[in-house]
Image (cartoon, helix red, strand yellow):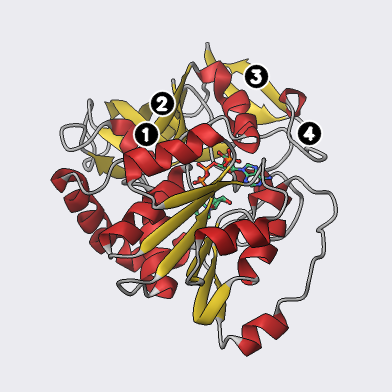
Amino acid sequence: MNKQIILESRPEGKPEKENFEFQEFDESENKDLTLQSKFISVDPYLRGRMRDEKSYIEPFEVGKPLESMIVSEVTDSKNDKFKKGDHVIGMLDWKKQQQHSGEGLRKVDPSMAPLSAYLGVLGLTGLTAYLALDKIGNLKEGETLLVSGAAGAVGSVVGQIGKIKGCKVVGIAGSDEKIEHIQKKFGFDAGINYKTTDNMKKAIKDACPDGVDVYFDNVGGEILDAALQNINKAARIINCGAISIYNKTEVPTGPRPEGILIKKSALMQGFLVRDHMEDFERAISELAGWLKSGELKYDETIVEGFDKTPQAFIDLFDGKNLGKMVVKV
Ligand code: NAP
């Protein structure tokens, strides 16, 4: 019997195990490829797809399997592009095995990098870090880069690119261990534990005495408000993610940013990695080069077992991951 994970109900607030259901089923479809899931990516943005809301991507349907980026092995093929034993990546259902036409899948090479890395540093989170900085950040040597979610998949790569570009890099994360880790392993100059800091505006001012030139925002909410209070003239604010509000039933309001943005001639811009597919090859080639030279390092939190997929996803909202959260099937 095959196994799949469906959305049982839409979460109210923080997702819970009860929102997911495991189903055993016999595969009735017969398509060109049979795929065996190897590594499943769990990502904060999947929370948005659990709402019944129009967005840049279709919402999940209740009663249907969830999907995310998955690295799979081809175990049977009637498709000229892929042969048995190949590894492929694509947006796939949360199923142990699945039938697939092959459309939208890309081969990945396990001899170039561990398979899980294609979901993180050489996948969408690495690409997000690289391309958001490339398209909006416009980092200059000597500038101060502030990044939230700094010990996560996107944030840890952002900080390291900042160091490669010769910037002073300050990270915000949710524990002292994470702050120590990003300084020791990734070379961040300083860090702020937002969970033990009651005045974020002051903490950012202390950590960034020359002000913030680029703020890479992965969390939104009050941390964004505090970062804005510290921006320099012509600062760039990258709205990449807003995990602090993903589980809110009502979107919280805060201080209005327009006054600061005008006074500082600052740019605040949203970013979606999927808008930049034409740049993926260039970005992956530079990220892979930095990995090879040792200038770029990465963390993964690998949770073992298909059945742990919902919990691994839920744990993102409690900061239980270091780097990319991935499920090994
Ligand atoms: P991640 O940072 O690896 O994992 C999420 C992290 O968020 C957790 O480890 C946790 O770390 C932190 N967090 C959870 N709740 C929080 C809260 N209330 N306030 C502050 N921090 C909180 O995830 P990721 O995949 O790299 O994604 C990071 C952000 O980028 C997310 O917002 C995601 O939606 C966004 N993203 C955007 C794009 C795009 O194209 N725009 C693409 C990929 C990802 P702590 O222990 O530090 O709290």
Mark closest to the chain's N terminus, 2 or 3: 3
Secondary element type, mark 4? loop
Question: Which residue, as the protein is rendered here, is positioned at the far right?
Answer: 250
Measuring from the top left, give residue 27's x and y in whole percent: 51, 21
Assess disc 4: are there few (<14), some (14-19) or many (≥20) residues with their C-alpha within 10 Å of its C-alpha.
some
- Is residue 276 visible in the rendered image? The answer is no
Which residue was labeled with disc 3?
22
Marks 1 and 2 close (CB-CB < 8 Å) = yes
Kindly report the distance in space between the C-alpha atoms of the residues bearing marks 1 and 2.
6 Å
Using the numbered discs, state the Cα–Cα distance from disc 3 to disc 1 in whole angstroms. 20 Å
In depth, the one of 240 and 7 nearer the eye is 240
- Cβ atoms under marks 2 and 3 closer than 8 Å: no
In the rendered view, tell whether residue 10 sits above or below residue 137: above
Q: What residue sits right under mark 2 in the picture? A: 37
Of mark 1 and mark 4, the one earlier in the sequence is 4
Looking at the rendered structure, the secondary structure element under dot 3 is strand
Instruction: Give whichever of discs 3 and 1 has the lower sequence position.
Output: 3
Question: Compared to 317, does 216 lie above or below?
Answer: below
Residue pointed to by mark 1: 71
Give the labeled residue for mark 4. Answer: 9
On-image quarter of the C terminus? top left
Badge 3 density bin: few <14, some 14–19, many ≥20, Cα 10 Å:
some
Question: Amino acid under label 3?
Answer: Phe
